[in-house]
């Protein structure tokens, strides 16, 4: 039996909501073909635009980790063949590993008759994040699985998805990052109470702004993070110039996408993407600039 699944990319954290919120976006998306037959073993083949930048085997490969875990949950011997058509640039901060992991988890839940609950499906997919982040953060995989804006809560094992307004989103892919694990390791181990309270207020009002479709509120809270972005943007030389170019074009908010290096900006009206790109190039960058939108489907 074979399933072909498409999973959207995602923007994790959405400013202040580190590890809690993520937004599915499409384009780009990954496509995964999963085939289960009698026999033994997990076999991965990478194809597509970014195939060459992926590790093909073993514990460095997200699809492999999810498939191995799924077999464990099924308690069966099966041969699993997976082709990953990699269209989301790996390590770019767009949930590339999360999208592949979500697609593989979704397919194997069906093909192995696992009958997983929504949360258990998110947990299964999160095994793929061990390859890139070293921890099973659940924000990207949840967004790719469910679409829309997702809010994950491992404390009570619950994920909530809500529709996201039809804003235009510009993603600037520029530079590279060591890896997500490193970008997590540079965050403080402890925070001032006042910073924690500020972030709680911003996340609460960010969610409210989406539910109320209040774009002024959205614009004021989304850039207001004291937990991750201020520490991470120091690692990215392009942050300052990209932010100011996007703001000059009328962005409601400019944020680091996940752990970076991609930067995402939200717009009420479709912005002039070609002009944005030209301005970034004359500032010495060589970015890929994508005009995209929220994907309210997973
Ligand atoms: N929430 C994760 C992080 C997303 O910021 O480390 C990584 O894509």
Image (spheres, helix red, strand yellow):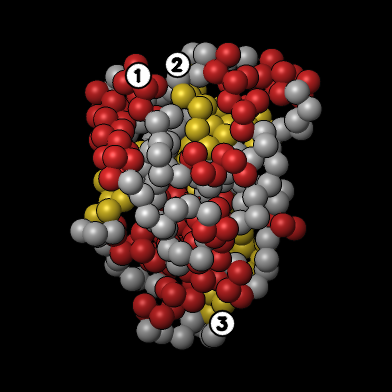
Closer to the camera in the image, 218 or 243? 243
Quadrant of res 226: top left
Name the disc covering residue 268, or none: 2
Q: In this view, does 214 lie above or below 232?
A: above
The spot of residue 227 in percent (x, y) is: 41, 44
| Element type at mark 2 | loop
Check disc 1 and report its element: helix, strand or loop.
helix
Q: Is mark 3 on a helix, strand or loop?
A: strand
Image position of 17 (left or right of 237): left
Q: Residue at x 31, y 51 (%)?
A: 152
* Residue 99 visible here: no
Pointer 3 local density, CA inside 10 Å: few below 14, some 14–19, many at least 20: few
In this view of the protein, can residue 77 be seen by the observer?
yes
Given this view, does label 1 or label 2 mark the residue nearer the observer? 1
Relative to 41, does residue 216 appear above or below in the rendering? Answer: above
* Residue shown at 48% from the left, 52% from the top: 187
* Disc 1 from disc 2: Cα separation: 8 Å
Q: Nearer the viewer, mark 3 or mark 2?
A: 2
- The residue where tag 3 is placed is 41
**Residue visible at 67% across and 37% down in the picture:** 237
The quarter in which the C terminus is drawn is top left
């Amino acid at each position: 039996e074979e399933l072909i699944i498409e999973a959207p990319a995602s923007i994790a954290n959405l400013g202040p909501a580190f590890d809690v919120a993520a937004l599915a976006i499409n384009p780009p998306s990954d496509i995964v073909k999963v085939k289960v037959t009698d026999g033994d073993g997990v076999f991965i083949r990478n194809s597509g635009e970014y195939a060459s930048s992926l590790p093909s085997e073993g514990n460095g490969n997200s699809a492999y980790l999810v498939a191995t875990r799924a077999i464990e949950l099924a308690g069966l011997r099966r041969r699993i063949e997976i082709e990953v058509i990699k269209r989301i640039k790996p390590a770019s901060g767009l949930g590339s590993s999360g999208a592949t992991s979500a697609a593989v988890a979704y397919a194997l839940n069906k093909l192995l008759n696992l009958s997983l609950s929504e949360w258990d499906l998110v947990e299964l997919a999160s095994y793929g994040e061990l390859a890139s982040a070293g921890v099973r953060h659940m924000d990207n995989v949840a967004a790719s699985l469910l679409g829309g804006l997702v809010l994950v809560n491992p404390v009570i094992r619950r994920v909530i998805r809500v529709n996201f307004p039809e804003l235009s989103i510009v993603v600037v892919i520029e530079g590279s990052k060591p890896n997500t694990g490193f970008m997590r390791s540079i965050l403080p181990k402890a925070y001032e109470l006042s910073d924690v309270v500020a972030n709680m207020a911003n996340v609460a009002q960010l969610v409210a702004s989406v539910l109320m479709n209040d774009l002024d509120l959205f614009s004021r809270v989304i850039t207001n993070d004291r937990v991750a972005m201020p520490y991470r943007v120091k690692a990215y030389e392009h942050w300052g110039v990209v932010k100011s170019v996007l703001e000059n074009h009328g962005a409601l908010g400019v944020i680091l996408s996940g752990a970076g290096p991609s930067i995402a900006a939200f717009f009420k009206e479709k912005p002039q993407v070609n002009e944005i790109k030209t301005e970034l190039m004359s500032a010495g960058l060589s970015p890929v600039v994508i005009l995209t939108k929220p994907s309210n489907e997973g």
